[in-house]
Amino acid sequence: MKQILLVEPDKKVAEIIKEFLERDGLASVQVAYSAQEAIHTADEFNPELVILELAIPKHNGFAFLHEFRSYADWSKVPVIVHSHLAKDEAAMSKSWKILGAVEYLYKPQTTLAKLKSTSFEVLGT
């Protein structure tokens, strides 16, 4: 079973994504609602993939990516950005790509099926 960390501040959206990704029993999803909680959860959960909303409270997704990548154990963990920020808005910083995000999915144009297929493709499942 693959371990996925979902960093999503909207509890309802997080619940829907978690349920969808876990539906076929191939993944276990832990949810974090903030950057600080995500770091703590990653430390306990050892994710094989992170799905990240950039617009998270207190520290944004870029700050989370920077801190996440500063730990040797997580330097190679793939990250999929799944954000309501358009790629053009996020491209102003390009930090998401520099910090090792392997894919950028714009929420309004991404179905749950696309998120799931991309996630499992990245995981090699």
Image (cartoon, rainbow, N blue to C red):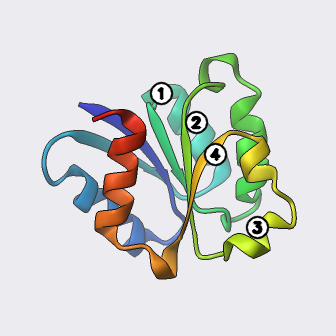
Q: CA distance from mark 3 to mark 1?
A: 29 Å
Q: Residue furthest bottom?
A: 108
Q: Is mark 2 in CB contact (under 8 Å) with mark 1?
A: yes
Q: Give the label, 1 or 4, closer to the camera.
A: 4
In the picture of the structure, the residue carrying the numbered disc 1 is 44
Q: CA distance from mark 2 to mark 3?
A: 25 Å
In the picture of the structure, the residue carrying the numbered disc 3 is 90
Please, is residue 79 above or below residue 76 in the view? below
Label located before the other in sequence (2 or 3): 2
Q: CA distance from mark 2 to mark 1?
A: 7 Å
* Residue drawn at x 27%, y 35% as measured from the top left: 125
In the picture of the structure, the residue carrying the numbered disc 4 is 101
* Residue drawn at x 75%, y 74% as measured from the top left: 88
Give the camera-side residue of 98 and 4. Answer: 98
Q: Is mark 2 in CB contact (under 8 Å) with mark 3?
A: no
Q: CA distance from mark 1 to mark 4?
A: 21 Å
Horizontal arrangement in the rendering, residue 6 relative to residue 113 (left or right): right
Tell me the quarter of the image containing the N terminus.
Answer: top left
Res. 89 image quadrant? bottom right
Q: Residues within 10 Å of mark 4 (few under 14, many from 20)?
A: some
Q: Secondary structure at mark 2?
A: helix
* Residue drawn at x 69%, y 65% as measured from the top left: 57
In the picture of the structure, the residue carrying the numbered disc 2 is 40
Res. 73 image quadrant? top right
Q: CA distance from mark 4 to mark 3?
A: 12 Å
Label located before the other in sequence (2 or 4): 2
Give, as a three-letter code, the residue at label 1: Glu
Q: Residues within 10 Å of mark 1 (few under 14, many from 20)?
A: few
Please, is residue 84 above or below residue 14 in the view? below
